[in-house]
Amino acid sequence: MKKSLSILSILLGTAAFAQVDVTATSGTETATYTTVKGAFDAINAGTHQGVINITITANTSETATAALNRSTGTSNFTSVSLKPAAGISATITNATTAGPVFRILGSNVTIDGSNNGTDSRNLSIVNGFATGSVVVAMGSSDVANPLTNVTLKNTTIINGVKTAGSGIIVSNAAGAQTAGYFNNIRLENNSIQKSYQGIYMIATSAVGNGSGSVITKNDLSTSGENSNRLMGIYLGGTDGVTVSNNKIGNFDTANNESKRGMWLAVGTMNTTVSDNIIDNIGVNSIAGGSATGIQIFTNAGAGSAPSANKILRNKITNLFSSGLNSSVTGISLGGSTVGTVISQNTINNLLNTKAGSSAGLGAEGITLNTGTASNTLVSNNFISKVSSFGASFSGSTGGILINAGSGYKVYNNSVYLTETQNDGTNKGLPIALSITSVTAAGAIDLRNNIFVTNIADATIPAYATSIYFSTLFSNTDPKIIFTNFDNNIYYSSSNLAILSVTTTPTILPALSNLQTTYGSNANSLQALPKFVSDTDLHIIQTSDNSTIDNKGVALADVTVDIDNEGRNGTTPDIGADEFTIATMAVDNVANKAKIQIYPNPVNDVLTVSSDKKVSQISVYNVGGQMIQEVNNANIINLAKLSSGVYFVKTVVEGKVEMTKVIKK
């Protein structure tokens, strides 16, 4: 009897500590293990075959890397799925080796951390080793057998340290930063924490290598102790990856290094980077360091094909640096990159607070520094609140800096600079558009842009645009560097523009001087548009802006605006926002009440702030139909409206204003 009880106790004890359940359609069909490594080892040995499901029922402590090999030889699986049991939140930890915790070398694998079939994150994968450098690694070193159809989603990834390594690395079989072979890799809705580089994806440059891979909805913005440090997402050598709707930011700020939200490195081609939020990345180190939202330095793709990357609808905000030789850049384009599109991005609040004579103290919204014939389209971008002590005409504080190269089409951008750094001794030099060291004939096509520098202190030199030649060339006449140069709006609180050849500046105080010196611009305007705010560069839909309405030229490359609203096919507007001045049968609107409408874009509740009583708020669709209205209130809930563009009419003590509002 005692012997029977002893055996029963052992069986119960085994069941109590079996945290990993496995089912399979062939081989051994059911089994339990204490670690994921135990389950993977059994699959590698051919114990479980066919369609395999792994269910995590409790926390596991891994004693070594859990490696899942390719299905070949003794291993014979069709697919492998790993997820927590229904209602269970679990943590898989390896605290005994440097990592990775998981190494995925076999295709057709899904790791889903949700315990209820939604996007909840109920599974954590933790590298608990004090010098751990990788949490999840995957890839292949075999060109004939690339890793394919692997999904990692709905998990929390926490590294052991943030001095080296990655949260997730997709590369070769060793899981090192060495190019590998893979496609159809999906990384979705993971929270990646305490990493040096959050997601690192590097492929051997070849047509189709990396194709079909998606990095989407991941959160790399944890703050505090578990913040990430150097870089959010890195791509190298890949062809055809989509990077969308990720949130990146709140990096550790203490180290002197070049921090990047994203980096598209050498050989990266046919990539779409869209709808990502990059916020609060910077360096607080006197030794220096730089912050870049998105850096593209890809050179040619496989077989010297155009890299053809698209950077669309990203929001890049709150980048900063305070050290020696530092720089802050929203989007940086360099190398021999060809065919890049940078469109519909919002960039604001870029700040460099280092004063002094050291080089590289600037801040720029977009920097273009490619080779010749780059076929680069920069269109429909909002750039605002860029500030630094940089005071060089070769690139300092600005909206768009074209810093060498050719093949640029710069269309319908809105740049509005309202501040610079000034400590009484050192003052920044804000320039909405800077062109430097561009000497190739016909290098730039520049039309339909708004370039405004509006500094409250009029004693600070500021320019809407500048052209700088560092040395004397035979073609230092700026007129020859443009293929087209017209239909732009310029404004500066100081002189309008400047031409500088070496150290000899020519100040251009007005549009007529710019037209004579720069050439063209017969249809350009010198005007100060009225924007919704210093950082929301949608045009206010009132008569204040009637003089700039419909002053652009139709361009085949720009058929919509920053909000995807269709452009007028004959006389579009200048700038990133296509707008319509509201004409309404109202009484004299002189002395109208001061109002502010926010937030814009809006998710749900829209607020109308005024120094007088708001008597009515009406919402119209783009077809002019009123679809919602409130009376005697200063808020209106737009949560039920579909995403798009609407017009909001406000009536304040009988005075009417119309504002375009974007519903997210």
Image (cartoon, rainbow, N blue to C red):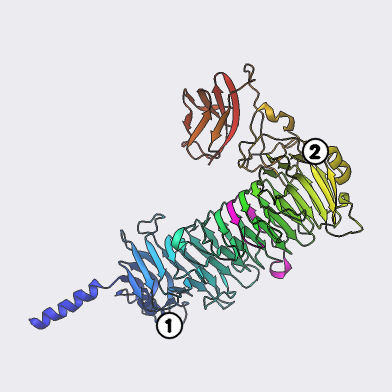
Asked whether residue 321 is drawn in magenta, I would say: yes
Q: Quadrant of residue 241 in the image?
A: bottom right
Q: Quadrant of residue 406?
A: bottom right
Residue drawn 50% across and 33% down? 607
Whole-percent x and y of residue 368?
72, 56
What is the crowding at mark 2: few (fewer than 14 residues within 10 Å), some, or many (at least 20)? many
Please tell me whether residue 299 belongs to the stretch shown in magenta.
Answer: no
Mark drawn on residue 74 = 1
**In the image, farthest residue toward the left:** 1
Compared across the picture, whether 258 is left or right of 83 comes to right
Residue 270 visible:
no
Query: Measuring 21% from the left and 75% from the top, which residue is drawn there?
Result: 13
x and y percentages locating residue 44 in the rendered image: 41, 79
Marks 1 and 2, the one that precedes in the sequence: 1
Front one among 259 and 373: 259
Q: Judge by depth and name the residue closer to the eye, 496 or 132.
A: 496
What residue is pinned by disc 2?
Answer: 524
Residue 235: image location, x then y, percent: 60, 65
